[in-house]
Amino acid sequence: MRTYKFILSGGGTGGHIYPAIAIANELKSRFPESEILFVGAQDKMEMQKVPQAGYPIKGLWIAGLQRRLTFDNALFPVKLLSSLLKSRQIIKQFKPDVVIGTGGFASGPLLQMANSAGIPTVIQEQNSYPGITNKLLSKKANAICVAYEKLERFFPKEKIVLTGNPVRQDLIAIDGKRAEGLAHFNLDPNKKTILILGGSLGARRINQLIEKELEFFASQKVQLLWQCGKLYFEEYQKYNSDNVQVMAFVERMDLVYAAADIVISRAGASSVSELCIVGKPVIFIPSPNVAEDHQTKNAQSVADKNGAILIRESELDTAFESTFSDLITNESKQNELSRNIKNLALPNATKAIVEEILKLIK
């Protein structure tokens, strides 16, 4: 049996890295003999996360353009040329059958060089509003796997395949895990549990909101699972109590989702895809500080279908308490949001993406 070779590239944030790892795992389970190599940006988090997942990775000297004049911007042309040359060398030595990009700076030079060498390329776009790298690469890509409808504004229509975003497989069957989740986090089964998610590093504005509203939450008789992020754990761990659990990071996402009654979350692409599968009532507070404001667009696309509540950061002080009170006291509203967000789930995304990749193998 022939051994296939795949290069995956994506990074900078967990939203680009974890989908790439999920795709690699699915390729490996189908073709145990296949060779898989990752390419990332040499000083970004993928250089740790990918080896932890058991795959080799090579780093490129690349970073994005800053929005202001900086020394890094002056170096950008040099970094880009260096990354293109190194990408060409990697492709020449490894001889991949297909190259897959999941977004982030490193995938740009790598897929560009794969296209020049005539190697098939697949783009996996997580967001409802694509980043500049994927927009540029889409003209030459063979297939573009997307998680949202109406992306023909940005990509060639005939290349688009609606697959959804890869998510952790253990989230697909959380329905039977509620008792285990409540026990794991030592929660009171008679109280509603509110899960707060700010992403792996944390979200300053969400943390400030939760801190300010702790008395309000106490008055609502709820308990909090507060994932504040590793950057903020030192600052907020003092609020640990019987009704508040402050965590830097959550290892068992399946159990934390199973235990939650309502989720308050950022709206990164991976989080939105996970929350669709999990099917809990969600209040999205998108980060306004990301490229092209794509978190707001991700959240809006769910809220438009009455699958979640969207509160912008600028509205938190005036709208949060009333919105939360209305939701926590309204079971039928909670059930409606749950039903609608679950209808948007695409649980077989990873398998569907791998099917598209396999179509391209000569």
Image: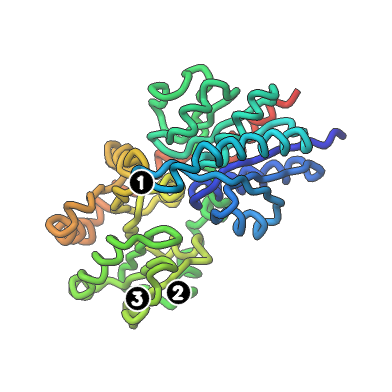
Q: Is residue 231 above or below residue 326?
A: below
Q: Amino acid at mark 3?
A: Glu
Per the image, label 2 sits on a secondary structure element best described as loop
Query: Which of the two discs, 3 and 1, labels the residue nearer the N terminus?
Result: 3
Label of residue 55 in the image: none
Colour scheme of this structure image? rainbow
What amino acid is labelled 2 in the image?
Phe
Let me know if residue 227 appears in the view: no
| Image quadrant where residue 353 sits | top right
Residue that badge 1 annotates: 290
Label 2 environment density (alpha carbons within 10 Å; few <14, some 14–19, many ≥20): few
Q: Which amino acid, mark 1?
A: Val
Q: Is residue 64 left or right of residue 4?
A: left
How much space separates mark 2 and mark 1, taking CA atoms? 32 Å
Mark 2 and mark 3 lie on one chain; the one further toward the N terminus is 2
Q: Could you say where residue 217 lies in the image, as x and y percent from the top left?
A: 22, 71
Nearer the camera: disc 2 or disc 1:
1
* Rendered residue at 39%/77% (across/down): 234
Mark 2 or mark 1: which comes first in sequence?
2
Q: Residue at x 40, y 39 (%)?
A: 343
Which residue sits at x=73%, y=45%? 28
Q: Which residue is mark 2?
A: 185
Dividing the image into 4 quarters, which one contains the C terminus? top right
The reply, left or right, for residue 99 in relation to residue 191 is right
Give the crowd class for mark 3: few <14, some 14-19, many >=20 residues within 10 Å: few
Q: State the image coordinates of residue 30 (x, y, percent, origin top left).
A: 73, 41
Q: Nearer the viewer, mark 2 or mark 3?
A: 3
| C-alpha span from label 2 to label 3 | 21 Å
